[in-house]
Structures are given as C-alpha cells and as structure tokens.
C-alpha cells in the first residue's frame, strides 16, 4: 500500500492492545514506524490503545471503589490506559533516534458529545499535528478518548480506538487508515473460534458495518461508519507480521473491480458473527399495550440502544416484552425500569435481566436475492440441539439469540453450514 502513496501523504496507523502489550511489542512497532520515517514519510500519526487487559483492570479498580461512580470520573479512569501507551510508544520511538510529539485526546481538541463511555467525535483540531510534523516529529496520539464541551474527559465505547484513528485519518485527509491488530485482517468468522475461517481480502463497507455491529470485534462499528461516510479505505492487518499482502481492505463496493464483485456477491452468507456482550431483558405484567412506547422511550431517552424486541399479549390486561441491549447499558436499563415503576401501567411489572445469552448472526449482501437462509439457519441450529430464544432479520443478516454456553458452537455450526468446514 505504501508503495502506492506519495511521500507527501499522511500516514495514520492504529495499534491495538496486543500490539503494544509489552516492551518487545512496543519496540517492534517503533522500529516499523522509524523505518517508514527513514524511508521519507514525514507525516506519520500513530493512534495507540491501552495495553491489552489494561482497560478491564481500570474498570475493575474504579467499580471496586464505587459500583456507581460519577461518569466523568469513570471515563477519566478508563482513559488512563491510552495515556500510558502514548508515553511508552513515544519513549520507544525517540530512543530509536526520531523526535516525537505525544498527544492525549484533549491536546488535539478531540471534541465529543456529552455521552460518557459512548461519546461521538464532533471535531478534531489538527493544527498541533501539522505543527509537530513541520518540526520533523512523529505524532503519537491516545485512542479512545476525547473531551466534551464541559471540559470533561470522555471515552468512545469499548474498542473505540479504531474510531479515533479513522476520525483522525478523515480530519488529516489521509488516503487510507491502517488498523494493526493481532489477526491478519477480517475473517469469515472469528479465527479464534473457527480455525479454518478464511481471510476476506476485500470487503465492502456495508458488510463490514453489519459484521462490526453484530459483534465481530476486529473493527469498531463507528470506525466503519466513518470510513463509509468519507469513503476512506481501511486496511486491517496483523501488527506481528511483515507481509503486506495478508490483509483486508475495507472499501466502497464500486472500487472492487467487476470480477471481484462477482466473487464477493456470490456467497449468500459471507460471515458469521458472535456477540457475547448482550443482555436479555424480560418485562412481564405490563397493564396496557399502549404503554409499550413509553417503555422504549424511557429507555432510549437514557441513551440506550435496544436491539431485538419480542412483544406478547398474555391476556387483555397483561402484556410482556423481551428485548436485548448491550451489557454496558445494564445500569441505565435498571435506572429506566426504576423510573417506569412509578407509572401505574408499570407498577406491577416483574423484570428479569440476564447475561446468559449471546447473539449469533449470519451476514451477507448475497442474502438480498436468495430465500431460505432463515430456514437453513434454524435447521442447522436445531440439528445441533442449540435453543433459539429470539430472532431478528434484515435484508442482509439473520440473528439468533442463543444460550451463552452454546454461542461458540452455534458459530461453528453456521460457518460449516454456509461457508466451509
Ligand atoms: P485490538 O486490540 O487490536 O483492537 P481486538 O481484540 O479489538 O484487537 O480485535 C481483534 C480480535 O477480533 C481478534 O483477536 C479476533 O479474536 C476477534 N474477531 C472477531 N471476529 C473476527 C473476524 N470476523 N475477523 C477477525 N477477527 C475477529
Ligand atoms: N482500550 C479501549 C478498550 O479496551 C479502547 C480500544 O482498545 O480500542 O476498549
Ligand atoms: Mg479493538
């Protein structure tokens, strides 16, 4: 890829948690970056994540002190992981003889909205970056964090460093954004679950977005959204390997040439995803069907995204609703339920919130023109004796909520059914 871009272009590279996990990994990355610098690229911006495990450790630390901490303090704790990585990476690059400019989010004005732990980036001030480049420095930037109008540290949601990198690449007018991770690229399913999963070398934004939203961790959904919106290709590659051919390019479908498009569109299902980060919420004894909108508006006003919904009438005066949300929204859902209980229609509700479920999905743009995918999905899961608790479909995906203990088996079964053994 680098052989195709001019030395005047900006290079934006993101390194994830495993890519900066220890001293050796940090030196590896630093050497690669210094190599590019010495070959003549002078506009290099690195975005780094917290070292693997660090963000979880910080979450545990603060929740151990107070299970419901102030959101601004919570985000401040989480953002600390990326701060450490920026400092370590900057030190490593400078040791190899190249000057660096380390930046936390607020130092390059990564301005976000007010929603802590799921903030969206509004703007970035690239002036300090251009200034540092003029001085011959490599910029090292903290992913995952920003600052809101109230001057509080915000974070972008788990896995959000990908989004920081793509937003930066857009703001800097880069030709692409490189996401370096611990696998070779985007596969037909998680290669840690199915060893025979294949690398998808070229992937359209739409499928990538669906995969990311449905739980394939390798790309943060909002980074794909941004790539799509600004038509900025994403190169996903393994930071442990030198070979530049083993990678995935996520790009606009029009850029994939006609023969490739044929290949891309021919499989009905192109990937299988697993989301282990969901909660199933069951609400029983709702007194009126007209209250359902109130239930969902109360929850959405708190900033919670509801996914699959099932609505049942038990009898004339009793209704029940089941829905799924992200695990990270548990406290907000509980807050919403407490608010609803003050309403007469909800005074007798019984609520069950359970994390014992996962969502497995089959995805493919080819599903648009083929029918029978749902019945094949159900048949395959039934044959493997996997219980299907909820289902949702769109033009290009079918999702099933299954017991968490069966999630990985469900992925294996569906990968075998639709993609390969
Ligand atoms: P990073 O720390 O580099 O951001 P992540 O852990 O967030 O890395 O994402 C990489 C992981 O995503 C891989 O180790 C892999 O287990 C998982 N993954 C899930 N689905 C896929 C997929 N379809 N293709 C590639 N990796 C996937
Ligand atoms: N460190 C953050 C997380 O673990 C952000 C990221 O890795 O992208 O979620
Ligand atoms: Mg990630």
Image: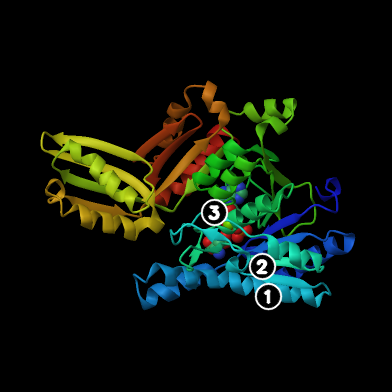
Query: What residue did someone put label 3 on?
Result: 122
Visible in this render: residue 391? yes
Viewer-side label of 1, 2? 1
**Marks 1 and 2, Cα distance to the nearest angstrom?**
9 Å
Side (left or right) of 192 relative to 260 = left
Q: Hey, which quadrant is residue 339 in on the image?
A: bottom left
**Marks 3 and 1, Cα distance to the nearest angstrom?**
28 Å
Q: Secondary structure at mark 3?
A: strand
Confirm or deny contact between disc 1 and disc 2 (CB under 8 A).
Answer: yes
Q: Residues within 10 Å of mark 3 (few under 14, many from 20)?
A: few
Where residue 291 appears, as percent x and y from the top left, is: 19, 41
**Marks 3 and 2, Cα distance to the nearest angstrom?**
27 Å
- The image's mark for residue 88 is 1
Of the numbered discs 3 and 2, the one sitting upstream in the chain is 2
Q: Is residue 392 above or below residue 113?
A: above
Of residue 283 and residue 172, the one placed in the foreground of this image is 172
Q: Is residue 202 above or below residue 9?
A: above
Where residue 412 appears, as percent x and y from the top left, is: 52, 43
Of the numbered discs 1 and 2, the one sitting upstream in the chain is 2
Query: What residue did someone put label 2 on?
Result: 20
Of residue 36 and residue 238, the one placed in the foreground of this image is 36
């Amino acid at each position: 890829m680098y052989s195709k871009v001019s030395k005047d272009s900006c290079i934006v590279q993101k390194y994830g948690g495993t890519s900066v996990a220890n001293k050796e990994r940090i030196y590896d990355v630093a050497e690669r970056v210094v190599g590019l610098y010495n070959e003549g690229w002078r506009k290099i911006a690195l975005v780094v994540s917290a070292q693997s495990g660090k963000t979880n450790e910080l979450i545990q630390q603060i929740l151990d002190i107070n299970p419901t901490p102030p959101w601004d303090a919570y985000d401040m704790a989480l953002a600390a992981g990326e701060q450490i990585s920026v400092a370590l990476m900057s030190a490593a690059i400078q040791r190899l003889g190249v000057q660096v400019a380390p930046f936390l989010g607020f130092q390059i004005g990564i301005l976000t909205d007010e929603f802590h732990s799921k903030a969206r980036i509004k703007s970035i001030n690239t002036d300090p970056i251009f200034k540092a480049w003029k001085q011959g420095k490599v910029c090292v930037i903290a992913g995952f964090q920003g600052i809101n109008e109230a001057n509080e540290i915000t974070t972008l949601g788990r896995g959000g460093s990908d989004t920081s990198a793509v937003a930066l690449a857009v703001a800097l007018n880069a030709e692409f954004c490189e996401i370096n991770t611990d696998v070779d690229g985007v596969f037909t399913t998680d290669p840690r679950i199915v060893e025979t999963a294949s690398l998808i070398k070229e992937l359209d934004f739409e499928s990538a977005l669906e995969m990311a939203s449905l739980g394939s961790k390798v790309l943060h959904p909002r980074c794909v959204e941004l790539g799509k919106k600004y038509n900025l290709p994403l190169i996903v590659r393994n930071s442990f390997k030198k070979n530049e051919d083993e990678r995935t390019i996520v790009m606009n479908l029009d850029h994939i040439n006609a023969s490739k498009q044929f290949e891309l569109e021919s499989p009905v299902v192109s990937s299988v995803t697993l989301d282990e980060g969901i909660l199933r919420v069951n609400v029983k004894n709702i007194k009126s069907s007209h209250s359902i909108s109130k239930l969902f508006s109360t929850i959405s006003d708190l900033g919670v995204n509801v996914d699959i919904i099932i609505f049942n009438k038990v009898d004339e005066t009793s209704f029940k609703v089941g829905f799924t949300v992200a695990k990270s929204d548990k406290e907000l859902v509980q807050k919403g339920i407490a608010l609803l209980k003050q309403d007469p229609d909800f005074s007798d509700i019984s609520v069950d919130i359970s994390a014992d479920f996962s969502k497995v999905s089959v995805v493919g743009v080819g599903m648009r023109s083929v029918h029978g995918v749902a019945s094949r999905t159900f048949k395959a899961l039934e044959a493997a004796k996997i219980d299907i608790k909820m289902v949702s479909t769109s033009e290009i995906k079918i999702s099933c909520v299954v017991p968490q203990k069966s999630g990985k088996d469900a992925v294996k079964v569906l990968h075998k059914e639709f993609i390969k053994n």
